[in-house]
Amino acid sequence: MKKFDRILFFTIIVLSIFGLIMIYSASSIWAEYKFNDSFHYFKYQLVFLIIGILVMLFISKIDYKIYYENANKILLICFVLLILVLIPGIGSVRNGSRSWFGIGPFGIQPSEATKLGMIIFTSKYLTNSNKFLKSYKKGVFPILGILFTLFGLIMLQPDLGTGTILVLSIIVLLFIAGVNMKFFFGIGILGVIGIIILIVIAPYRMDRITSFVDPWSDALGTGFQIIQSLYAIGPGGLLGNGFLNSIQKQFYLPEPQTDFIFSIIAEEFGVVGAFIVVGLFLIILYRGINIALNTKDLFSKYLAFGMTFQIIFQAIMNLMVVIGLIPVTGVTLPFISYGGSSLLISMVSIGILLNISKS
């Protein structure tokens, strides 16, 4: 057995520790005001980071073939959890979405686990159904049926950002598996129709699109977050205003330690700091693809590709929101934003990647 990919491992450690430091910087003023403890968010994230690193190292020692054997069970558990979280009294509402299981001061988000569970299941499915993939009826439609059932449950919460990442990850795996290109044009058209329907049935999404097109049309309402984000990024310049010197985190940008933490990074460390963060994600992308290309069996190839692209898609979506390229989706920046569920699932994904890299 080879040693696991040390470059990937140390990249994750550096990114996570930097994220922890930035969570303190971004949240200290809010935390002092809300909890009378400037280290409130820092301490909770530190707990999850320590647990996450231990879990990552533990998972890296487990043979990835066990996920092939238990893929159906893993997806079934995710399916049950997505149903349970929708039940009042079991699932709790945060920021308008019933997508959490509250455990004391902590919260667990089953949709995060579902993203990984679906990657594992799809990797097994594609390994076993490779000869059927040219037949939509036998090969493609069954996996799409499962995918959009899970997407529907996630949208009932509602959580469009997580649902979008889930769908994109599986579509990319189908592309890698060699599904006919005509299929993706059809999926694109259906996707546009689906987005229009989602907007019609939930007017607040239209407000987000309107604020995306012209945030200053409702500067104190739907456009507030993106305007404050741009106000943070702009003054950062080349080298930034310095660590702890952000202005926008002082009650201008709401909850700056979560979805918009990259804005604070750009404000305090400038273009150089922003490029370093993006560079670290590019290293993750490169090492993940390298692991996928060098592994021997089909299941691990799909699994490595799927987990890598899922992390990168989430990072890209977050960065696009922060700089105003797409409407606000509520997606966190992996390994950096505050959030225990996202961090733990990302660490589990990296642990599996590290194990695959040893094969």
Image: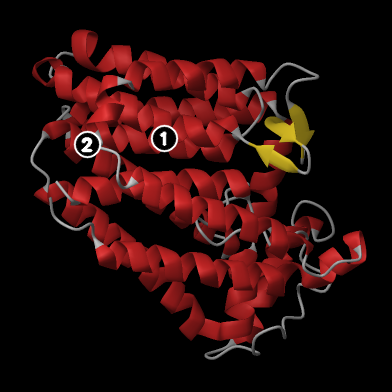
- List the residue tagged with mark 2: 302
Any part of residue 38 in sight: yes
Where does residue 25 sit, x and y in percent of width and height?
70, 75
Residue neighbourhood size for the residue with mark 2, other residues' Cα within 10 Å, grouped as few (<14), some (14–19), many (≥20) = many
- List the residue tagged with mark 1: 116
Query: What's the residue at 26%, 21% (across, down)?
Result: 69
Q: Is residue 289 left or right of residue 190?
A: left
In the orientation shown, which residue stands out farthest toward the top?
137
- Between 224 and 269, the residue placed more toward the observer is 269
Where does residue 8 sit, x and y in percent of width and height?
30, 62
Q: Amino acid at mark 2?
A: Tyr
Query: What's the residue at 83%, 72% (across, down)?
Result: 29
Q: Is residue 220 left or right of residue 149?
A: right
Where does residue 257 sit, x and y in percent of width and height?
69, 62
- Between 38 and 301, the residue placed more toward the observer is 38
Dot 2 or dot 1, earlier in sequence: 1
Where does residue 222 sit, x and y in percent of width and height?
77, 51
Query: What's the residue at 60%, 59% (across, down)?
Result: 337
Any part of residue 251 in sight: no
